[in-house]
Image: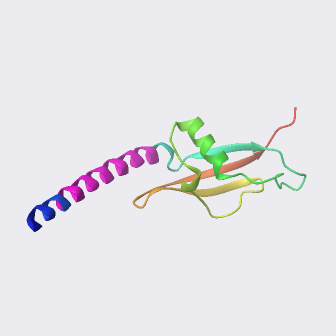
């Protein structure tokens, strides 16, 4: 009985490990689509280059999906600084403990017509 239980646990571990590898490979493919890319936001800003709000992780993932079709969730976006002014910012996309992508976010002023 103990031997059977041990075999069952061993098989479950193998299935889990195989599934984890498949997920990791999917994330690696998405990471390749966005790694080292620059995503540009055109935002309204005050006269002193501060935005009328911040760029949120949700806005970031929506732009990434629109430009590359990569599926990223807002919780995977790691921002080092709050994005609340014109400039170039870095973000890390944490797909998996072993799969990350670095992206740049360029915030430009909306050109008035």
Residue at figure coordinates x 53%, y 37% from the top left: 68
Residue 65 image point, x, y percent: 56, 39
62 lies above or below 20? above
Q: Nearer the viewer, residue 13 or 59?
A: 13
- Outermost residue to the bottom: 2
Q: Nearer the viewer, residue 57 or 41?
A: 57
Colour pattern of the rendering: rainbow
Residue 62 image point, x, y percent: 62, 41
- Outermost residue to the front: 1
Left or right relative to 70: residue 38? right
113 lies above or below 60? above
Q: Nearer the viewer, residue 81 or 4?
A: 4
Left or right relative to 65: residue 8? left
Residue at figure coordinates x 36%, y 49% from the top left: 23
Residue 4 image point, x, y percent: 10, 61
Image quadrant of residue 6?
A: bottom left
Magenta stretch holds residue 27: yes
Magenta-colored segment: predominant secondary structure: helix
Residue 43 image point, x, y percent: 78, 44
Location of the C terminus (image quadrant): top right
- Outermost residue to the right: 47
Magenta stretch holds residue 22: yes
Left or right relative to 38: residue 42? right
Magenta segment: 10-32
Residue at figure coordinates x 9%, y 65% from the top left: 1
């Amino acid at each position: 009985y103990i031997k059977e239980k041990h075999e069952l646990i061993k098989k479950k571990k193998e299935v889990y490990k195989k599934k984890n590898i498949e997920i990791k490979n999917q994330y690696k493919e998405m990471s390749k689509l966005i790694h080292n890319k620059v995503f540009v936001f055109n935002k309204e800003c005050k006269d002193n280059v501060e935005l009328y709000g911040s760029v949120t992780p949700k806005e970031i993932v929506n732009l990434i999906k629109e430009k590359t079709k990569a599926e990223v969730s807002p919780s995977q976006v790691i921002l080092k600084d709050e994005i609340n002014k014109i400039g170039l910012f870095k973000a890390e996309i944490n797909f998996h403990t072993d799969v990350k992508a670095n992206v740049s976010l360029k915030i430009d002023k909306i050109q008035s017509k």
